[in-house]
Amino acid sequence: MMRGRGSVLARGATLATDGTAHFAVWAPHAREVVLRLPGRNVWLEARDGGLFEARVPDVGAGTDYVYRLDGRDRPDPVSRHQPRGVHGPSRVVDPGAFGWTDAAWRGLAMADLVLYELHVGTFTDAGSFDAVIPHLGGLRDLGITALELMPVAEFPGARNWGYDGVHLYAPQSTYGGPEGLRRLVDAAHAHGLGVILDVVYNHHGPEGNYLAEFGPYFTDRHHTPWGPAFNFDDADSDEVRRYVVDNARYWIGEFHFDGLRLDAVHAICDLGATHILEEIGAAAHADALQLGRQVVVIAESDRNDPRPVRPVERGGYGLDGQWSDDFHRAVHAALTGERSGYYVDFGGVEPIAQAWRHRFVHAGRYSAYRRRRHGAPADDVPCDRFVVFVQNHDQVGNRARGDRLSTLVSHDAQKVAAALLCLSPYVPLLFMGEEYGEVNPFQYFVSHGDPALAVRVREGRRREFAAFGWQGDVPDPQDEATFLRSRLDRSRLGEPGHAQLLALHRDLLRLRREEPALRPGAGEIVVEVDVAGSCLGLRVGRLLAAFNLGAEARETSLAAPGSVVWRLRLSTDDARYGGRDRAVSLRPEGACLALWLPGWCAVVYGAEGS
């Protein structure tokens, strides 16, 4: 059994082996800082640059404390645990006390990731870190290689997506706090699963946000949709940058995370010579090297900008991956026919082909939704740098009623969507429940203690959806029923269609795992489009996949060696997957193959001997 390596932090509360604890807080806005412990107060010593610190005897793990700033009691900005929520006292934690069992775990490369995004609070009825653990074996059997946890930094109340977190170092207390999170990561590694954490550095939650009372954590120089931006490039920004970079290192070092997903990096404002994204990536990779593990840093960006994943020596930020929304939008528009909002730029099968060929559909071309050119070419960036999905928390939860694809399209269309995702040349991500066609919505929910803030959130959601063109009632985010509706209901696995969809995902991911050609970046990708017939062809190595995204059976022609004997490896219309076993045929026709496909069907052929 391996014990933790201890703290990577020089701020917050750090325990020493002699029974003392070191407390350090950056608070240049305070004249004095008093550490309030049970039964005693300790005045911290002021240092240069606004730092206050002291070494205090007889402090152990589990001790609660607050800082009194000029007469106001506030939690520690670098609190490791907030057992009584965002407004309560902080608690001293010993990061070296947990008995890790993952000494042999070395992490995963981007190309080996099959991601499963989950929200801890709605993944199970218990809504805790520990409650996820019994499901790890099933996820591994499905073919998942890494969990991606939505943000778990302490947020107000017990119900929240996690993007309103205000204690970036404190795992959510209602989920099980720091020890529960360590148990989950350790158990995941024991099952051969990596764990990636979604972190939020583009804004801070509104309730319980006391950072501005400590120092200039925010700046009026830049603004985000959520208010003033983090101060990454204005006066006194060095400690703010440290606060964020140390946080990234903290999750990797103290919790053994295999990577970070950086939320909405397009909203991170930094005009400095070294962008904060580059600094985060460099720090994470340096720590990984020291630990003898592989760590990945993945950005979410709305800009279709390849710079986050280009090497630093080529003007990029050196991150390992980024989300690509264009694949989702192309597939969703083709399957549902929706054309409102950003889907106006998509439709038919051609955009899917463009996403496969060029990473982005919009790579500098005009976007009707934005009424300007959007994106930049990324053909030079390896395929394993891009994460694609058909659904995720945003693309489901930011619909007016949080409806999943399973409630919008037929069972056959869901199976085609699964094949498009699992056979894509990029890193696939499934959103929890997608693998069996969960029909419960995933809606936006909060549990703010401030009634006025709850009203603002409710009204803001309604305005947002009105601008998007969606009609009808918008669920009240503050209502507990909205949260309860969003829980997974695995009892549906006993109903027709759901178990078959799960079996299809399992077989598709097994095929992806067993076929070297399907590893992102493994080889040349050939994409063909039959727009009139709503068909797509994808050839990678000695595998040939074809997709019919229409209701009518079609014959399509694909360029492939006719002299090769092609063997059917998988059909989404197989009875095992709830299909009708309709006829599929393939015959040589000159330098091409003529392929007959039923409506809403995907097939995979392998060259004989492959």
Image (cartoon, helix red, strand yellow):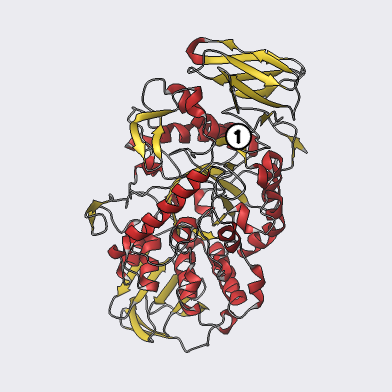
In the image, 282 versus 327, the foreground residue is 327
Instruction: Name the spot of residue 110 as percent of width and height, x first.
Output: 50, 49
Q: Decide if residue 114 is on the left or right side of residue 226.
A: right
Instruction: Name the spot of residue 348 as percent of width and height, x first.
Output: 31, 72
Q: Decide if residue 203 is on the left or right side of residue 369.
A: right
Quarter of the view holding residue 383? bottom left
Residue plotted at (62% across, 52% down): 120
Instruction: Name the spot of residue 136 as percent of width and height, x first.
Output: 67, 57
Please tell me whether residue 209 is drawn above or below residue 309 in the rendered image: above
Quarter of the view holding residue 523? bottom left
Q: Which residue is mark 1?
A: 87
Quarter of the view holding residue 424? bottom left
Please tell me whether residue 232 is drawn above or below residue 468 in the rendered image: above
In the image, 230 versus 573, the foreground residue is 230
Q: How many marks can you see?
A: 1
Q: Is residue 560 visible?
A: no
Q: Is residue 378 visible?
A: yes
Q: Decide if residue 360 is on the left or right side of residue 484.
A: left
Instruction: Name the spot of residue 20 as percent of width and height, x first.
Output: 73, 17
> In what element is the residue under mark 1?
loop
Q: Residue furthest bottom?
A: 583
Q: Residues within 10 Å of mark 1 (few under 14, many from 20)?
A: some
